[in-house]
Amino acid sequence: MSLSDTVKKYPFRAVCILTAAVAGAGAYVVSDRVVQARELLAQKTVDGERLETNVRDAGQLPEQLEALTSAVAKIQAKLIRAGQLANNLQYFYRLETESGVELLDVRPTGSVKGPYQGVGFNVSVKADYLTLLGYLRRLENGPHFCRILSTGIAAPSPDRAGPLTLSLSLELLGQP
Amino acid sequence: MLSRLKKSSPEDSELELASWHPDFRNTARLPDTKAVRTSFLVNGIVLLIAAVAVTGFAFKVYELQDINTQVAHWQTQIDRDKAPSERAIALYKKFQTEAAHVADVNTFLKSRPVVSDVLLHLGKTLPDYVAIDRFDLGATNLNVRGTVRGAPDQASGRASSYLQQLKADPYFATLFSDISLLNLNRNTQAGGLILELSFKLKEAKKP
């Protein structure tokens, strides 16, 4: 019995088998597409969530950036310029006048290659203990950022009479 | 009764099978008289297979459509958020740059102790029997030299208790990892004992 005879004899079965075959093939093809679509969906989900998080987290970013920019502008104003030696030395002479110490020596040390680096100075002053303390406090809490690398305070004589000598190696935060 | 007990021979069964008249029936054309027809069963099974295949296909198509809908949803959201996200990233990069400047300043200031605070605290906690003669802060250590008043036996006890006091001080504990006595010698000129202390800085960084 040929195939056509069989189909003619059992048309319902033939239609069912044909339908099953077509549907099976279709399911196979669509399954493949489903796998690809799932991969695409995973990628889009990751991208979408990342973008959504970026947008959500950046809600207050403009205000925070503004506050930070303002703070950095204030920091910038407190930086010294390593190249402006006269202005930098003037700062120490002004400090001498304001605090009442006697400035024995001040000289710059080293050079600055980039921004936000310490500009070095060696400073020697003479005064009584309280005046020296006032000088140090002005220096460390003054208009420029200062860190003291080394300090030497010595009494002038064994009986501790007379003014003290303060030697400082310090850095003021600056830029070239 | 005896006939039932009698064993049947092969000849007897042949006799039983053989029809007593010719069989003119065409069995292929005769209707199926079984309770459930074979044809019905086969059709049912084939129909079931087809139904399962169609259902599977329909489900896959539905699944694909559902995923595509979700992809489209995410794509819409991505298109909506892309520009604000890029702006946010640009802002954040700027924020990081600015924050780095603040961190630089913070590192600069925190890298060394505040000398005036150390001096003030040293003065505030100084016993009346100790006088400071030298104060030297270096890269890794603070060395302090002073005089302890009193007779040598009394002054050495005072020096020891002062050292314990310094070690127990919470402020100095935050700045120095170790405080040790370097020397305790007789002061021939002013009397008492010359005290030399070394304060080892915590996380001492080379300037």
Image: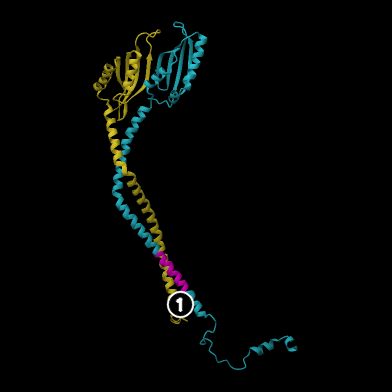
Residue B4: percent from left, percent from top: 72, 87
Q: In the picture, which quadrant includes the N terminus of chain B?
A: bottom right
Q: Which residues are magenta?
A: B47-61
Q: Nearer the viewer, residue A140 or A39?
A: A140
Residue B25 drawn at (x, y percent): 54, 90
> Residue tagged by mark 1?
A13
- Left or right of A73? Residue B5 is right
Q: Is residue B148 left or right of residue A52?
A: right
Between A84 and A70, the one nearer to me in the picture: A70
- Most extreme residue toward the bottom, as rendered? B21
SS for callout 1: helix
Q: Colour of chain A?
A: yellow
Picture residue at 67% right of the left edge, 87% below the top? B13
On whether residue B57 falls in the magenta region, the answer is yes
Q: Mostly what secondary structure, the magenta segment? A: helix
Q: A52 and A13: which one is in front?
A: A52
* Chain B drawn colour: cyan
Q: Residue at x 32, y 47 (%)?
A: A55
- Can residue B97 be seen in the rendering of this structure? yes
